Structure formats: structure tokens, C-alpha cells
């Protein structure tokens, strides 16, 4: 009987992408098939996140559960990858000696070898080194299900924001060559993918080798990806306010496949805090990008990341952040209280703001942004939205669900043959705009990634067409 692989992916989309590549690898090397039920797996992999303390804590609690499974089934193989593995290396084994393989984001391509070595020697294997750009050369063609896919265009980060572990866990920033990216996009498009999201920590800093000899910019790459046959919608995440070029803004005006949505992390609206965070730009730069993006693509949706309660953040700094929110009218955000990460420069900074004050600020910010989300969802009433039809709706019998450019899921009646195609849907109803209207305090501090309860427009289709 075919052996089974269970992967739990924590944290960011990069990890999600890496997890699916691990599954591709172990399918081709060891014939492992992926399962969503850990109890029926022969190999368990935990792809970890260390961006905040809470994320890191989850690692050992999950491993504890897996240890109990291994006690009952000693043949079970347990592997730990991702950013916690990268940071802790051998130390993972001290706390969890039952772990058989420890690998980092840059060594996941060595998993088949590590698994073989483990099975042969019956000893734990550790490899969290940073071989440069080697990973992609060893990965098989991706296998995708569904009609949306991630494609990684670069690895690591060299920006060293003072609060962030990523440069230490994922290594220096390095771009994949242009041809490799295009090949992977074409491979997933051939398997039915219509929407790709290009992934990297600073995708707009992309500088990939082009076969014509020059270094390809991100805007040039975007245009080429949008032109791959079958690809009808392109997104990217994450971008950085530095290097947000005129060429990239022009692409938003000129490339119809580019979704009218940009996720552009800003972290804070205060110049003082931005400097302490080592973001290397003033807030005027950010405001200017947003103004020009809105001019290039009227109606574009902007989302962002915020860190609240960075060391030294005053009421005035927080007010500056709220002023920015008013100016930009963010549609959505991933916002968290600052979490001190060992080994980063900010961990040494004096931090005398009480936790309760930080939580109150976070609640104010989230409430404001959730209000924006609701208003922008409301404004979709009566509009025609182009959705990529994803699957049958579980919520309403006989309905399908598709994703709009601004990432709202729209439910509408339709035939299953539409799945994987684009449909134009007239929004004729918006379900349950959140309790905000009643003024209810919505947010409690949590590490939940998806923080905004999006209103669900239900629609009908006046017309539909196929993807080009
Ligand atoms: N490349 C992106 C960020 C990637 S990390 C950028 O340019 O900003 C994803 C998000 O995690 C960050 O945007 C930040 O908001 C959050 N984050 C990172 N380190 C954090 C910390 N120490 N505490 C709280 N949030 C943090
Ligand atoms: Fe982290 Fe800043 Fe890079 S937030 S991922 S160091 S751009």
C-alpha cells in the first residue's frame, strides 16, 4: 500500500508553497501520497514559522501530539522544517529527541536523501545550511490541484528590518532566473491554473538573470507572466515600499491580468518608528506610491501589515498610523502586537509601553480597518465582478464560489462546468456585514492570520466568458 505523507504548514504563503514542493519531491522520490489526516500518515512534516513568539510556541505543542502518535507507532517518521528549524537546528533534537529530520527552507530539496539516511542509519538527520539557489534545481515539476497557484520568484531577504527574523532564517535575498520562473508558471498553467501569485519577501526587488543577458526587473517579469497562455490573473506578495518603481506602477495601468489589489506592508505611519524599524523610507514615500497607484488603477484595493507597540511607540506615533489608515483607506490588514525576536536588533531596544496599551491600540486599528472592509464590500452591491470560479459552494446548495479581484469570495448559482473558468457575476446580495455596525468590540488579541470576517456577496451571473 502506498505510504502517506502529512504536512502541517504554519505561517506564511512561502511556507505553503514550500510545503507543496516537499510533497512533490517525496511523491517522486518515495511515492508518498499526501493526506490531510495525520493519523493515517507514515511521514509527518511540520513546516514551522518563527515570525512571532506565539507562532514559535505552536511548534512544540504540535510535536508533543506527534510524539504520542509515535509512541504507539515507532516507525512513524517525524520531520521539522521551516524557520524555527532553521533557527534552532540541532537544538530541536534536545527538546524533541523523537524528531528524525530537521531541515531549513533552503535545504528542503535534500529531504529524500535525509529520509533515506534516516531509514538506513536509524539516526536523526539535521541539515539547516544555506546552499545558494540550489533548491530549485532539484525540485521536480510542481503538481497542482485547482486553478490558483503560488510561484516563488525569490528567496530570503536582505533588508534586515530591526524587528524581523526572516533574513536570519531564510538567508540573503536571491532571485530565481527569469526562465525558471516562466517555466514553472507555464507548467502550472498547463495543469489548469488560471491565477498565479508570485511570491517573495520583496518581490518588487526582483532582479533575475534573463536569457538575453540583462537582469530582469519585477515589472518586466510581471508582463511576461501575464502573457503565459492560460494565465488570466496575476497577483504578487509581498512588496516593499522601497523599489516600488514607476515601471511597476505603469504595469498596474497597462496589464489587464494584474489584479486590482496590492498588499504593501508599511508597519507604521510614524517616521520616528519607521526609522527605528530600519524600513529606510519616510511615510511620504508610501503616501506617494499609493496616490500614484490609485491614479494608475482607479478603485485598486490596498492591504497592508502593521506592527503595533514597537519599542518606544507613543500615542502620537500610533495616531500617525491611524492618520495613514484614514488617508489610504486600507481594505484589509494583517496586524499584530510587536513580538520580541531573539537575535534581532529591536530585541535590545527599551520597551516601556504596557501590554494593555498595545492591545487597546491594536483593537482601535483593527476596528477601523474592519470598518473599511465592510464599507468596501457594501460598495460591491450592484456591481459586476469578475470571479475565478473555484468550487461548489458548501454554504448554498447548487451554488458555486469564485474569487473576485479584491479577494472576496462570491457565491452564485451555476453549473459545475464553470469551475476553473472566469465568470462575470452581478452582486445582488451581501451577506452579514459584520457586527461592527452595532459597535460591538470585534477583536480580541489572537494570532489568527485571517482576521477580517469578509462579507460574502451572493450573486447571479448575467454573462460569463472563458479565460483567454
Ligand atoms: N517582506 C515583508 C514582511 C514579511 S514578514 C515586508 O516588507 O514588510 C510578514 C509580516 O510579519 C511583516 O510585514 C510584519 O508585519 C510581521 N512581523 C515581522 N516580524 C514581526 C515581529 N517581530 N512582531 C510582530 N510582527 C512581525
Ligand atoms: Fe522582514 Fe523587513 Fe525583510 S519585514 S522579510 S526584514 S523586508
Image (cartoon, rainbow, N blue to C red):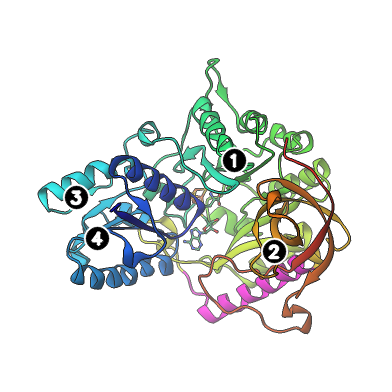
In this view, the residue farthest toward the left is 121
Label 4: element kind: helix
Using the image, tell me which numbered label, if any, was put on residue 192: 1
Image position of 311 with respect to 34: above or below: below
Q: Is residue 368 magenta?
A: yes
Q: Please state the horizontal and vertical placement of residue 325, each as a whole percent of the image.
A: 73, 62
Label 2 or label 4, whichever comes before in sequence order: 4
**Nearer the camera: disc 1 or disc 4:** 1
Residue at position x 64%, y 50% in the image: 264
**Nearer the camera: disc 3 or disc 4:** 3
Residue 270 in sight here:
no
> Is there a contact, CB below 8 Å, between mark 2 and mark 3?
no
Q: Quadrant of the C terminus?
A: top right
Task: Out of 319 and 149, give the one closest to the viewer.
Answer: 149
**Circle 3 is placed at which residue position?**
125
Residue at position x 56%, y 45% in the image: 149
Q: Which residues are magenta?
A: 351-374
Counting other residues with Cα less than 10 Å from the Cα at mark 4, is it few (<14), some (14-19), or many (20 or more)? many
The CA span between labels 3 and 1 is: 37 Å
Task: Out of 43 and 89, give the one closest to the viewer.
Answer: 43
> Is there a contact, CB below 8 Å, between mark 1 and mark 4?
no
Label 3: element kind: strand
Q: Please state the horizontal and vertical placement of residue 104, each as a whole percent of the image.
A: 32, 48
**Nearer the camera: disc 2 or disc 3:** 3
Q: Is residue 50 magenta?
A: no
**Circle 4 is placed at which residue position?**
92
> Is there a contact, CB below 8 Å, between mark 3 and mark 1?
no
**Circle 2 is placed at which residue position?**
320
> Is there a contact, CB below 8 Å, between mark 2 and mark 4?
no
Counting other residues with Cα less than 10 Å from the Cα at mark 3, is it few (<14), some (14-19), or many (20 or more)? many
Horizontal arrangement in the rendering, residue 181 relative to residue 168 (left or right): right
Label 1: element kind: loop
Amino acid at each position: 500500500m502506498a505510504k502517506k505523507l502529512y504536512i502541517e504548514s504554519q505561517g506564511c504563503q512561502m511556507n505553503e508553497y514550500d510545503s507543496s514542493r516537499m510533497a512533490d519531491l517525496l511523491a517522486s522520490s518515495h511515492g508518498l501520497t499526501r493526506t490531510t489526516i495525520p493519523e493515517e500518515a507514515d511521514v509527518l512534516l511540520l513546516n514551522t514559522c518563527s515570525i512571532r513568539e506565539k507562532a514559535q510556541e505552536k511548534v512544540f505543542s504540535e510535536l508533543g501530539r506527534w510524539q504520542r502518535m509515535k509512541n504507539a507507532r515507532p516507525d512513524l517518521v517525524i520531520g521539522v522544517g521551516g524557520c524555527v528549524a532553521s533557527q534552532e537546528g540541532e537544538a530541536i533534537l534536545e527538546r524533541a529527541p523523537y524528531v528524525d529530520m530537521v531541515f531549513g527552507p533552503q535545504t528542503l530539496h535534500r529531504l529524500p536523501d535525509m529520509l533515506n539516511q534516516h531509514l538506513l542509519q536509524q539516526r536523526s538527520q539535521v541539515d539547516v545550511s544555506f546552499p545558494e539557489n540550489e533548491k530549485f534545481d532539484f525540485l521536480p515539476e510542481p503538481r497542482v490541484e485547482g486553478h490558483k497557484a503560488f510561484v516563488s520568484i525569490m528567496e530570503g531577504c536582505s533588508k534586515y528590518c530591526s524587528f524581523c527574523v526572516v533574513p536570519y532564517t531564510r538567508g540573503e535575498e536571491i532571485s530565481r532566473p527569469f526562465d525558471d520562473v516562466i517555466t514553472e508558471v507555464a507548467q502550472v498553467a498547463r495543469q489548469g491554473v488560471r491565477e498565479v501569485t508570485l511570491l517573495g519577501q520583496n518581490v518588487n526587488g526582483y532582479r533575475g538573470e534573463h536569457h538575453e543577458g540583462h537582469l530582469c526587473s519585477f515589472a518586466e517579469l510581471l508582463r511576461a507572466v501575464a502573457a503565459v497562455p492560460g494565465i488570466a490573473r496575476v497577483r504578487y506578495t509581498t512588496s516593499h515600499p522601497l523599489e516600488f518603481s514607476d515601471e511597476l506602477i505603469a504595469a498596474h495601468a497597462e496589464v489587464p491580468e494584474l489584479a486590482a489589489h496590492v498588499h504593501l506592508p508599511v508597519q507604521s505611519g510614524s517616521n520616528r518608528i519607521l526609522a527605528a524599524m530600519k524600513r529606510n523610507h519616510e511615510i511620504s514615500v508610501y503616501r506617494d506610491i499609493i496616490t500614484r497607484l490609485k491614479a494608475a488603477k482607479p478603485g485598486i484595493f490596498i492591504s497592508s501589515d502593521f506592527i503595533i507597540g514597537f519599542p518606544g511607540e507613543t500615542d502620537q506615533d500610533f495616531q500617525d498610523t491611524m492618520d495613514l489608515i484614514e488617508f489610504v483607506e486600507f481594505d484589509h490588514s494583517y496586524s499584530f502586537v510587536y513580538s520580541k525576536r531573539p537575535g534581532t536588533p529591536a530585541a535590545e531596544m527599551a520597551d516601556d509601553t504596557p501590554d494593555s496599551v498595545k492591545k487597546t491600540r491594536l483593537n482601535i486599528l483593527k476596528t477601523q480597518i474592519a470598518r473599511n472592509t465592510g464599507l468596501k464590500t457594501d460598495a460591491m452591491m450592484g456591481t459586476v465582478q469578475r470571479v475565478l470560479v473555484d468550487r461548489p459552494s458548501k454554504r448554498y446548495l447548487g451554488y458555486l464560489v469564485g474569487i473576485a479581484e479584491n479577494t472576496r469570495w462570491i457565491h452564485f448559482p451555476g453549473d459545475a462546468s464553470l469551475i476553473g473558468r472566469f465568470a462575470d457575476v452581478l452582486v445582488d446580495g451581501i451577506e452579514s456585514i459584520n457586527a461592527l455596525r452595532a459597535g460591538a468590540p470585534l477583536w480580541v488579541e489572537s494570532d489568527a492570520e485571517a482576521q477580517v470576517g469578509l462579507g460574502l456577496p451572493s450573486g447571479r451571473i448575467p454573462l460569463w466568458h472563458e479565460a483567454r
